[in-house]
Amino acid sequence: MELVRYLLPHFAAGCLAGLVAAAAIVATDLGSLLALMQHSPEGWLGGVLLAFGFVVTFGSVAVGSAIQQIGQQE
């Protein structure tokens, strides 16, 4: 249980970073992604899939780096 309590904040921070990164990509219209989403009838679905992919990826990276740092002393 202690491990879960240690990893949960790292996972939450990674998920938040993933949402921020996905929002920044859409907000800056990188690669005309926002225009594509606006002109597509199901553009919201692309945004959801982008956000979900970023959340999973960034959350996993944060948890992985937290696991690697468990044995290190400060």
Image (cartoon, rainbow, N blue to C red):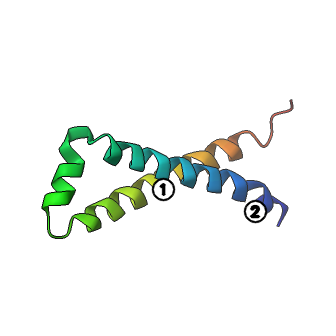
Q: Amino acid at mark 2?
A: Val
Residue under the point 81% across and 34% down? 72
Residue under the point 68% across and 51% down? 10
| Mark closer to the chain start, 2 or 1 | 2
Residue under the point 70% across and 47% down? 67
10 Å crowding of disc 1: few (<14), some (14-19), many (20+): many
User: Marks 1 and 2: in contact by CB < 8 Å?
Assistant: no
Q: Nearer the viewer, residue 31 or 52?
A: 31
In the figure, is residue 7 to the left or right of 59?
right
Disc on res. 39: none
Residue 12: image location, x then y, percent: 63, 56
Q: How many marks?
A: 2
Residue 6: image location, x then y, percent: 78, 55
Nearer mark to the viewer, of 2 and 1: 1
Disc on res. 4: 2
Residue under the point 86% across and 32% down? 73
Q: Residue furthest top?
A: 74
Residue under label 1: 55
In the figure, is residue 23 to the left or right of 4?
left
Q: Nearer the viewer, residue 71 or 53?
A: 53
Query: Quadrant of the image for the C terminus?
Result: top right
Residue 52: image location, x then y, percent: 42, 61
Residue 1: image location, x then y, percent: 82, 67
What is the distance, in whole Å, between disc 2 and disc 1 at their CAs?
Answer: 18 Å
Indicate the secondary structure of the residue bearing disc 2: helix
10 Å crowding of disc 2: few (<14), some (14-19), many (20+): few
Q: Amino acid at mark 1?
A: Val
Indicate the secondary structure of the residue bearing disc 1: helix
